Image: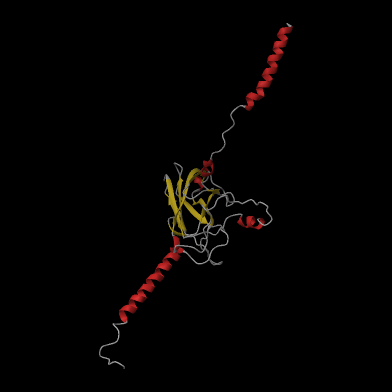
Amino acid sequence: MRITRVLGTALLALGLAAGPAAAGSSPSPSASSDDAASTRAGTSFRTATEIEQGQRATASGSTGDYLYWSFPADTGQRPTVEATVKLPVTHGSQTWQLDVYDGLRRRQSCQYGAATRTAAQGAASVQLACVLRTVRGWSEPWADDPLPGTYYVRLTVVDLGASDLGQPVGAEVRVSSKDIGGAAAVDGSLGKPLVPGIAVKSGQDKDGSKAAVLSSFGSDGGWSSGWWSDRWVWTAIGGVLAALAGIGGYVLTRGSGRPSRVPPGT
């Protein structure tokens, strides 16, 4: 009997010791992958989901929600924002709108593209697009020209029936850009790109302290705002051609020298 008690106590102790170890070795919930940021959208400017150009972002929401994304755009680029909204099976007529704001939260006008569209009753989806003006390296303080930095995309419905409010929808957004180059270059450059938190960061760099920057992305290889553009190359080529044209005109108009009919010494 005593041996049985000893064995029972030993087995109980082993079970208690193995319990926490087994619990600790249980698989933990998988961490969110890198693509998690592209499957959701923010609900305001401060919570806008950051995406890169060329990246496809998707999100689920409800009619009436404001969906926000943000992306970087640099000098010489002409961004194009495209959005597709997947509508519920049964719905009435709905009007969706795509707005783009710069780093100062100024609404930027679209060069072309359908930024506002109405989906007919029963339509499966609605597509919107907005082609912005070329991003400039410098602008007058009173102007609303697009400048390098962060841009915000807002997608929402602006007109729908009361019965359709709150129905689930799916959204897909993609941003791309075309490099325009020196054709749209201007003299001067912007001191700092319009990126959230850049003023706080630059103000605390002197004392060596670190500041939290709201935007974690930027342009690949740094922001290219500066004095150089391919416009200088074309300006130099134009100057060389003008000089050659001037020399050619002089050669053609100077003649062969002293006319033969003029007597010597005159």
Is 256 on the left or on the right of 25, as rendered? left
Residue 90: % across, % down:
44, 42
> In the depicted view, which residue is nearer to us: 58 or 189?
189
Residue 67: % across, % down:
53, 48
Q: Residue furthest top?
A: 1
**Residue occupying the point 74% across, 7% down:** 2
> In the depicted view, which residue is nearer to us: 84 or 33?
33
Q: Residue furthest bottom?
A: 266
Depicted 237 relative to depicted 211: above or below: below
- Color style of the picture: secondary structure
> In the depicted view, which residue is nearer to us: 129 or 262?
262
Q: Residue furthest left?
A: 261
**Residue occupying the point 68% across, 14% down:** 11
- Quadrant of the frame with the N terminus: top right
Depicted 53 relative to depicted 30: above or below: below
Residue 25: % across, % down:
61, 27
Tag count:
0
- Quadrant of the frame with the C terminus: bottom left
**Residue occupying the point 61% across, 56% down:** 198
**Residue occupying the point 72% across, 10% down:** 5
Is 163 on the left or on the right of 13, as rendered? left
Q: Residue furthest front?
A: 265
Residue 9: % across, % down:
71, 14
